[in-house]
Each structure stands twice: as structure tokens, then as C-alpha cells.
Image: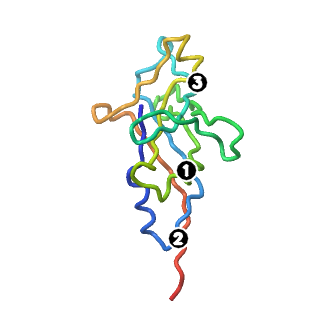
Amino acid sequence: TMISFPFLNDINAEGEMVSIEKAYLQLYPVRFSYGANYPLPKTLSLYTTDVNGVTQDLIYNLGGTAVQTGNLVTDDATYTETYYTFDLTSFMQSLLGTSGSSMKKLKLVLPNKDFFSSCKGVMLGDMDHPTSNVKLTLVYKTYNEKK
């Protein structure tokens, strides 16, 4: 699954200077596409890619010391609040202001241990699956000099 943010630079119009303070991504699997017989993987991995989809690197945490994975939050009662959450703060900070061939994308994959040794998977939605959502929460600051 490829994830891109083609309109991220639109927030630059909010002020003379804009900085991203926090960025969180939540990916909701298609409701009822998983369960006891079809368990979801506990984590998902994110890689950066170039504009052509060629894998470049893993996403790291803010300190650059650990690989960023999406942790599964489950809702076994209503299935409406089951999602993977990712902290994309450092990635979005590096992406802000880039364009063209410098604009990186994300590639969502199963961790190696699940990819090579299990039948686990996750079904993310599209327009035909309205019970699946993608939520990006951006917290940013703007600066405008008084004239």
C-alpha cells in the first residue's frame, strides 16, 4: 500500500513561516474483514519511497533510534475503533517544503516475521469500503510578522 501527501505544502499558505509540531496517521482496516479466523498483524512497518515507488529506508522515531511501526489498537465490541497508529512527525517535518522528485511517499508493509511466515494481512479500504478510514492529524504552528 502506497501513501502520499500531495497537498501537504498547502499549509505553507497559512503563514509566513509554518512548522509541523506533531503528525499522527491512523489507518482503519475494513470493518469485519478480520476476526478470530483472520487476525490482524500486531504491527505494520513503514518505508519511505521515491516518487517512483522504489523503497529507500525505514521510518524512524523522533530520536532516530528505533524503527517506527504502526501499533494496533483494537475495538472488539463494535469494530469501529480498530486502527493502526503511526507517529509521522519527523517524516512530515522533512517532507514539508519539498516538491517534484524530492517528494517522498510511504510504503506500508507487513513486518518481515509476518510477511515470510504467516498468512496474516490487513484489508484497507477505498471508495467501495466506506467503513475503512484514514485519518491524518497535523499539529502545526504559523508565524506572521506584524506590519
Q: Nearer the viewer, residue 124 or 110?
A: 110
Mark 1 and mark 2 residues within 8 Å of each other at the beta carbon: no
Q: How many badges with numbers are in the image?
A: 3
Task: Name the residue rendered at 41%, 35% in the picture.
Answer: 53
Residue that label 2 marks:
17
Extreme-bottom residue of the structure: 147
Quarter of the rendering occupied by the N terminus:
top left
Q: Nearer the viewer, residue 65 or 132?
A: 65
Q: Circle 3 — which element?
A: loop
| Residue 34: % across, % down | 45, 20
Which amino acid, mark 1? Ala
Mark 3 and mark 2 residues within 8 Å of each other at the beta carbon: no
Residue that label 3 marks:
42
The circle on residue 23 is 1
Task: Name the residue rendered at 44%, 29% in the picture.
Answer: 29
| Residue 95: % across, % down | 50, 52
